[in-house]
Amino acid sequence: MSENPQKVLHSGSNATVGQARTQSRALKDERLARPSPRSVGRPGPGSADGTASALRPAGPPSPRSKKTKPAAQYDRFIPNRSAMDMASSQFNIARADSDIPLDGASIAYQEEVARACGVSINKRILKFKEEAPTSEKDDLRQVYSRPALKSSAPTGAKRRILNTPERVLDAPDLVDDYYLNLLDWSLGNTLAIGLDQSVYLWNATTGDVNSLCQLEGEAYIASVKWTADGTYLAIGTSEGDVQIWDAESQSKIRTMAGHQARVGVMSWERHVLSSGCQDGSIWNHDVRIANHKTAELIAHSSEVCGLTWRSDGALLASGGNDNLVNIWDARSAVPKFTKTQHTAAVRALAWSPWQLNLLASGGGSYDRHVHFWNTTTTARLNSIDTGSQVTSIQWSSEYRELATSHGFPHNHLALWSYPALTKIVDIPAHDTRVLHTAMSPDGQTIATAACDESLKFWRIFETRSKCGKGSKATSSVAAAASGAGVGTGASAAGILDMSRPSHIR
């Protein structure tokens, strides 16, 4: 040991240097592994660089550290969790993880509540939207490309509107005058038509034709009108007389004179017959008494060519060549109100059968409009520009529709829906203007007469219960004898059997 003291000293020095290097390396590694003061907090007491605080054993966090805002967490499915009830969600997740079985009473109660609410016990009730379709469900392209379900109504119930007449009869010597009313169809299924000086009755059930009367001299038939029950026929003449005829016995009951000009239009209200004259006057006749004239209504300055009582007998509508529409109260000789919107003669007047206070009126060649009036409020509800002279209006009792007949320039029948007032179909009716129309007693067929001396029958308002079957009136028309005609020149050649046309559904 004493033999070589320098060697010993040298070895000791080397050990001291090695230990120093080892301690220095350990301190460097410890410094690198130590967290920064920003992430740990302020240094503890007695330590300048935070070493003591970093090496201190872990304990409960200080109150200041609890206030530190937690780092934001994001979910790619739910970007914003502020709208969610996290406490409730965590509670439900904890319940779902627990395997606490329910007793039989709880399960039965849940099933009973679900059954009462009409939901499945294992299905979510409240959700933001429907679930996305899975591969087990139908392909959406196939689902939405499927054809619509067919109507459950039988095919035989489809309504058909023929564009050619069911039957055509001769009507020779029909006077071509817009202001006359020469056609009417009775409740007994008998059609009356005035041809020059004669009135003919055609029974649509049997096809029999009878000449009821014939005027003498220069007089001609100006109007015809059946009573409501079809028992009596009123005939207005060009001489100003009104005749009452019994259709069954074909005898004249009485003549009521007094008008100073022709009687071109008439309308019945039970035992009261109203007649419109060329001089603009309207008379009410009580056919039960000798002094038949009970009232004279003066408001038109020109010929009265339209006249019709409402079904309840409370109001009378009149139209004249002075372009006026007057509404009369049955208890007054002064018009309830007057409408001046038409710019031509008003002959076409018709009360709606399913709305008591609805009146339709149609104007002549320089007007061509159909106006609809509320007779309670006196307001005009709507109008149609038909494009042709309006000669008559027929409401349907089966459908919310009306048919209008027209003169120049188209000479056709038009079918309209109500209240939409859209045109359903146009039917080319005659070669010349359609002067007169009459509705069959069953409301399905319209008869039209024109100055081309033809009488045609159109099945337009076929009933829903008999779609695909002929109506009573049209069946009677089709069953008429081949020799049945209207007029003195009627013959087998006067009846044209039209081929059945294509129909409009």
Image (cartoon, rainbow, N blue to C red):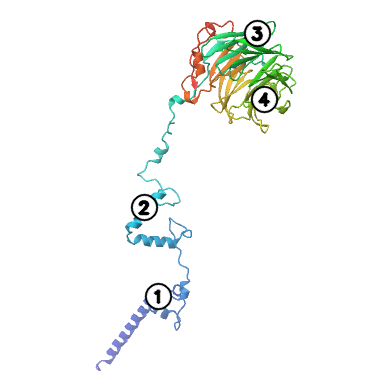
- Can you give x and y, in whole percent of width and height, for residue 403 in the image? 58, 23
* Secondary element at tag 4: strand
**Mark nearer the viewer, 2 or 1:** 2
* Disc nearer the start of the sequence (4/2): 2
Q: Amino acid at mark 4?
A: Leu
Give the residue type at disc 1: Arg
For the residues labelled 2 and 1, the Cα–Cα distance comes to 61 Å
Return the residue nearer the eye: 371 or 399: 399
Q: CA distance from mark 3 to mark 2?
A: 89 Å
**Element under label 3?**
loop
Question: Regarding mark 2 in the picture, which secondary structure is present there?
Answer: helix
**If you read the primary sequence from the N terminus, does the residue marked by circle 1 or circle 4 appear first?**
1
- Residue 6 in the image: above or below residue 177: below
Q: Which residue is mark 4?
A: 316
Q: CA distance from mark 3 to mark 1?
A: 131 Å
Q: Does label 4 or label 3 sit earlier along the sequence?
A: 3
Is 175 in front, or is 206? 206
Quadrant (top left/top right/bottom left/bottom right) for the N terminus: bottom left
How far across and how far down the image is residue 395, in percent?
A: 58, 24
Q: Is residue 195 above or below residue 313?
A: above
